[in-house]
Amino acid sequence: MRGRYRPRGGITQARQRLGFEPLRELFAEVAVPVADLGTEGAFLGPWRLMTIDGFEWDVPDSKENAAGFGYAGTAGDAEGGAGYPKARVVTIGEGASHAAVAAAIGPVTSKGSGEQSLARTLYRRLEEDWLLIADRNFYNWPDWCAAAGTGAALLWRVKADLRLPVLELLPDGSYRSVLVNPKITGKARGKLIEAARAEDDLDPGKARYVRVIEYEVPDRDGDGNDELIALITTITDPREAPAGVLAQAYHQR
């Protein structure tokens, strides 16, 4: 048996020669949702609850990793400074099981290395029976359009200063609104909003209907600064998913 023993270093070297491509392809093949209909919290109506999130990983402190990934802030360098190089990771995962089904990895310190840039490479993986929940760091007009274009349902938090005109108040406390391409301003923007009030068909490259759920989270420190949560969703009929149910799904993501 000793003659068959292979040093740990030999396995590591073999993996390095193999490269990352086969492992990436293997992950794409086997990483799928695992919850079934009996799994608590896995579904909301016809939709499987999915989340997108970003985080950072420490990677081994080497010159190659320092050059490829960089350091967060001014933590250190490959010549012996404090800290480790970091990789930025964005994953799409199943809410109930936390199983990752898609992932993108990149550096932390180069142009185009932010969470939105990495997430942009994953939206094509969305399925029509998914409800993708995202925090406010992920919203922008082109990415919302790209994700919605897959047919998946979306529930994304947006920053409180996003302009969301009220088209119609709905019985569950939510309201119908319209997202307008931010490149369209002035009178042209106003005309699109008026067309939306009239329930006209909209050019999806210019404007898109959404439903908005807004609520406040009481300030736990007691200084009176309650936090306003603003969620937008492609599920425009409140009978399919009431505002309270969507708010709960967001907070349990």
Image (cartoon, grey):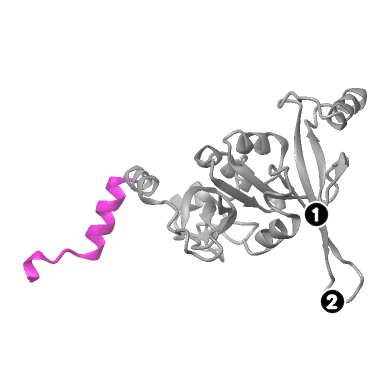
- The location of residue 166, given as percent across then percent down, is 88, 42
Q: Based on the displayed image, in which of its 4 quarters is residue 77 positioned?
A: bottom right
* Alpha-carbon span between mark 1 and mark 2: 29 Å
- Identified at 28% across, 47% down, the residue is 17
Judge from the rendering whether residue 95 lies leftward or rightward of residue 173; answer left or right.
left
The answer to whether one can see residue 213 in this image is: yes
The one of 62 and 177 positioned closer to us in this rendering: 177
Main SS class of the magenta portion in the image: helix
- Above or below, 143 relative to 32: above
Which tag, 1 or 2, sits closer to the chain's start? 1
- Above or below, 242 relative to 40: above
Magenta run includes residue 15: yes
Specify the label residue 172 is tagged with.
1
Which part of the image, by quadrant, shows the N terminus?
bottom left
- The location of residue 80, given as percent across then percent down, is 51, 63
Decide: few, some or many residues near mark 2? Use Cα within 10 Å; few <14, some 14-19, many ≥20: few
Query: Disc 2 marks which amino acid?
Result: Asp
- The location of residue 22, given as percent across then percent down, is 32, 44
The one of 82 and 190 positioned closer to us in this rendering: 190
Specify the label residue 221 is tagged with.
2
The one of 99 and 39 positioned closer to us in this rendering: 39
Query: What are the residue bounds of the magenta stretch?
Result: 1-19
- The location of residue 241, given as percent across then percent down, is 68, 52
Which part of the image, by quadrant, shows the C terminus?
bottom right
- Above or below, 95 relative to 105: below
Q: How many numbered callouts? A: 2
- Identified at 57% across, 35% down, the residue is 150
- Identified at 60% across, 41% down, the residue is 117
- Identified at 81% across, 42% down, the residue is 176
